[in-house]
Amino acid sequence: MARFEQYKEKAINESSLKNGDIVLVFCCGTGLDFSHILKKIGKEGKILGVDFSSEMLKKAKEIIRNEKWENIELIEADITKFKDKLEEKADVGVCTLGMSIIPDFKSAYYNLLSNVKEQGEIIIGDMQLASGRLAGLKTKLTISLAKKYGGTYEGHQNSLELYSMMKKELTDIIKREFLLKSYFYCIGEKK
């Protein structure tokens, strides 16, 4: 997980997140993205973390309490049913290592967009099918590593479609690939 942590941090650092931003984090889990986001949004900003798992959110609450973070709100919800739920749209929407394990990733992605203001930023980091030389072998290796987190061949394959969706819905897209080109992050501005 340490390697993914490094890629997540790179994505957050490359983003346009700034002091005071409201950030919606889908599939927030235990809050592994929070510290990186907080460095950029400061105490004036706010994080809204959404996850389906009460167990993950319980761990996130413990971390938030231990770190004494006061500007994070956790929401237990199914992101495939989280369309237009925020009273105030977020400045930025983030989802790392979540879309590839959700069968209805399209609804999840569009729901993330629905809760981010126009010209807001979207940051997605996830697994994808490896490409290039020895792609089949690389894909088998990375899927076997991702299985314990819910990763599947189909999920990795879905990321290709997700990227196509992002190209239609976002502008100024940046895409970076890592780990045998099996992990990527994309940053773009909502149209």
Image (spheres, rainbow, N blue to C red):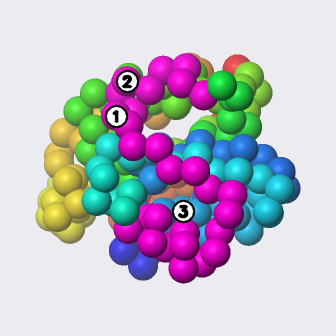
Which of discs 3 and 2 lies nearer the camera? The answer is: 2
Quadrant position of the N terminus in the picture: bottom left
Residue 172 lies left or right of residue 148; in this view the side is: right
The answer to whether 20 is drawn above or below residue 178 in the figure is above
Q: Nearer the viewer, residue 176 or 146?
A: 146
Q: Nearer the viewer, residue 171 or 118?
A: 118
Q: Nearer the viewer, residue 182 or 86?
A: 86
Q: Residues within 10 Å of mark 2 (few under 14, many from 20)?
A: few
Residue 121 in view in this figure: no
Q: Residues within 10 Å of mark 3 (few under 14, many from 20)?
A: some
Report the residue marked by disc 2.
81
Report the residue marked by disc 1.
78
Amino acid at the residue labelled 1: Asp
Amino acid at the residue labelled 3: Asp
Residue stretch rendered in magenta on the structure: 59-86
CA gap, disc 1 and disc 2: 6 Å
Amino acid at the residue labelled 2: Lys
Determine whether label 1 and label 2 are within 8 Å by CB.
yes
- Residue 84 magenta-drawn? yes
Report the residue marked by disc 3.
33
